[in-house]
Amino acid sequence: MLEIRNLVVKIADEDKQILNGLSLTVNDGEVAAIMGPNGSGKSTLSYVIAGKEDYEVLDGEILLDGQNVLEMEADARAAAGIFLAFQYPLEIPGVATMTFLKAAMNAQRRARGEAELLTPDFIKAVNGAADRLGIAKDMLRRPLNVGFSGGEKKRMEILQMALLQPSMCILDETDSGLDIDALRIVADGVNALRDPKRGFLVITHYQRLLDHIVPDTVHVMSKGRIVKSGGKELALELEKNGYAGYADAA
Amino acid sequence: MAAVQETIDQVKSIDVTEYKYGFVTDIEMEKPAKGLTEDTVRYISARKNEPAWMLEWRLDAFRRWKTMKEPDWARVNYPPIDYQDIYYYAAPKGAAPQSLDEIDPAILETYKKLGIPLREQEILAGVAPENRVAVDAVFDSVSVVTTFKKELAQAGVIFCSISDAIQERPELVKKYLATVVPVTDNYFATLNCAVFTDGSFVYIPKGVRCPMELSTYFRINEQNTGQFERTLIIAEEGSYVSYLEGCTAPKRDENQLHAAVVELIALDDAEIKYSTVQNWYPGDAEGKGGIYNFVTKRGDCRGRNSKISWTQVETGSAITWKYPSCILRGDGSRGEFYSIAVSNGAQQVDSGTKMIHLGKNTTSKIIAKGIAAGKSDSTYRGMVSAHRKATGARNFTNCDSLLIGDQCGAHTIPYIEAKTATAIFEHEATTSKIGEDQLFYCQQRGLSEEEAVALIVNGFVKEVLQQLPMEFAVEAQKLITISLEGSVG
Ligand SMILES: Nc1ncnc2c1ncn2[C@@H]1O[C@H](COP(=O)(O)OP(=O)(O)O)[C@@H](O)[C@H]1O
Ligand SMILES: [Mg+2]
């Protein structure tokens, strides 16, 4: 369970406050969607949860299963179960995707005091997940994300999510840059991971994604705060009326 | 990645966050007065008991050098060097040691600390015969010991200091010295001819495969002293040798000069594999101190189907100016250059190679990987040329730069010159960057920052490390990781 209480965040080297007392809870097994206009602070929220250093938390707390994650390094948060599918996945030159996946999986296992994966088990897991996401084998030999198309990068994020088996998945605009077929594959990949023990925070600008990943709750974000929460019907309402009505609420 | 983890563990276990070889050995040294005159040249030659022809050769070089100008075309910056403010010779006091027992224990201790065993019994103890390495240990201006000479002599291989070779095999020295790098080749090479002090001499007779790895370990210890290394390797017809050099120096606030000349000669069907792990003191993060490494290294594939390959892992020195090259004279000969140049802090590197195709159907391959971090600056400068007669010449060049952080710089300067239409030269180059965003991405997947850097860097340099003999590859990988410590965050 992820609990965010009264989170106030500014850019570390600037006098610019982005999150202004944001509170949000995502229960185990829940799929929560955050919708909001560009610039409302959605990516910032995802980065702060994951532990990016460019931000300074002025107030509030973030708890994962009751544990204060703000005191943890980003890699420790990952090992604790937080996964962020990036809005813009980064290119890792010179490191074959396979190599990267194995290093990441084993690093998390080590951090949790578990034994490292046996190579045959690892290869089986990767191949299975790649097949389900329509990722060609030769892509796994290429350096991670280097020269991948936007859609390929997004699929690779879901592949990593499937392999790392996090307890809290944050998806930042995973639908952007995807055509309808790719969107369906990615959504199926996410839906396959839905589990009573796993929470999802699906960040999106458009309702479209939520037709495929049906959320339990929808939160509207504006100017660094959650300004309205409701069920999945809230997404449809937003689609019809736009965000205009919420700008003032912030 | 087991290998990556191993590197990290090794790095952690030795607990270094800075240059590890920076200690000074306290030992009484014999030195002439500072500065460079004809008398200095005579002093060096006399100290080495050289024959008259050698002294004359040195003096000629010295006179030429006085008319030359220091080159300024490299992308490096340093204040003018005062050549009169340097000691040109420094040797441990007393008579030259005839055996290990006569060597000052402080020197033996130094090499022990550096991880270079000089006692053959100790080397023999834990190592299979095929993994033995013979060592020539050069301490400031003199070679203090060369191991396994006897075993090598049984195979007909000569492995000794260049000073001994001048005494014992003058006919070979006269025949080959300065036939690859002419006396007047460049400012630093000419200076080296005048004042070279020690280095290694290797001669592999016809048809012999050298029975073990040969290596020279250069240590600069004395303050304000230049080191002028001279190495000459000759591989006769059908022979093979693999040679490795390593270098370190104490941490000092002032800059020190290492101006070396290395010449390799491969005759018909011979092969020389020359590897360097260069770890001279790089200076501090602000650029204070460190070695100026101005080196001329050139191999001559003189015979048909001969082969010379240079592999270098450059992590040290404040300034590196170095272009190990191959003259592909024999028809069907092959030159290779594999390089990893790592710079951090305020280091400046201008390095690369020249492949000069003269013979028919000559081939060459260049794989250069530059990693720049901190505020360092790294330039790859490569020249590939084909003579009119070099029909069918082929070169493949791959030159990649990896920038860590955004305060460093990398540059690629290729020169290509083909005077025959049949030459095929291919050139590939890439530049990539690891920034904080990439590291955060890796950390988000569970890797620590050090693991992430090691993973990326190891992937980047793998192709070159594979060229090194196994035990040195591990050493080099460690060194690269250490050199990049503190480069991020
Ligand atoms: N590192 C940063 N430096 C400066 N401004 C930033 C930084 N990160 C985010 N911002 C600013 O914060 C605001 C929120 O950005 P972001 O979290 O990306 O919003 P969203 O994802 O909702 O579009 C924007 O005005 C953006 O320009
Ligand atoms: Mg965003």
Image (spheres, helix red, strand yellow):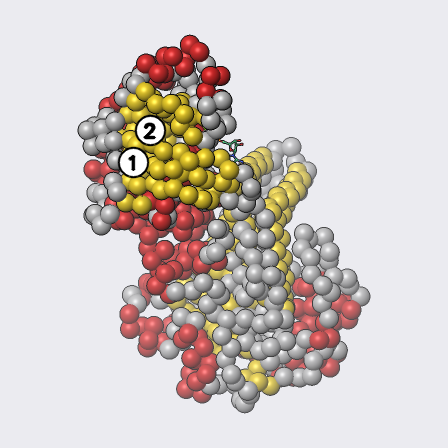
Instruction: Name the kind of residue labelled 1 in the image.
Output: Leu
The residue depicted at 51 percent of the width and 41 percent of the height is A11
Farthest residue to the right: give it.
B67
| Label 2 in the same subunit as label 1 | yes
Task: Judge from the rendering whether residue B130 lies leftward or rightward of residue B236; answer left or right.
Answer: left
- Out of B472 and B198, give the one closest to the viewer: B472
Q: Relative to B290, say whether A171 is above or below.
A: above
Q: Relative to B386, say whether B258 is above or below.
A: below
The residue depicted at 66 percent of the width and 68 percent of the height is B192
Please indicate, yes or no, whether residue A127 appears anywhere in the rendered image.
no
Please indicate, yes or no, whether residue B319 appears anywhere in the rendered image.
yes
The residue depicted at 52 percent of the width and 53 percent of the height is B342
Residue B97 placement (x, y as % from top left): 48, 85
Q: Relative to B129, say whether B473 is above or below.
A: above
Quadrant for the N terminus of chain A, please: top left
The answer to which image quadrant residue B71 occupies is: bottom right
Residue A69 placement (x, y as % from top left): 33, 44
Residue A132 placement (x, y as % from top left): 27, 23
The residue depicted at 40 percent of the width and 46 percent of the height is B452
- Out of A123 and B30, give the one closest to the viewer: A123
**Residue labelled with disc 2:** A201
Tell whether label 1 touches label 2 (CB within 8 Å).
yes
Q: Disc 2 is attached to a residue of which chain? A: A
Farthest residue to the front: give it.
A249
**Residue labelled with disc 1:** A2
Q: Nearer the viewer, mark 2 or mark 1?
A: 1
Q: Residues within 10 Å of mark 2 (few under 14, many from 20)?
A: many
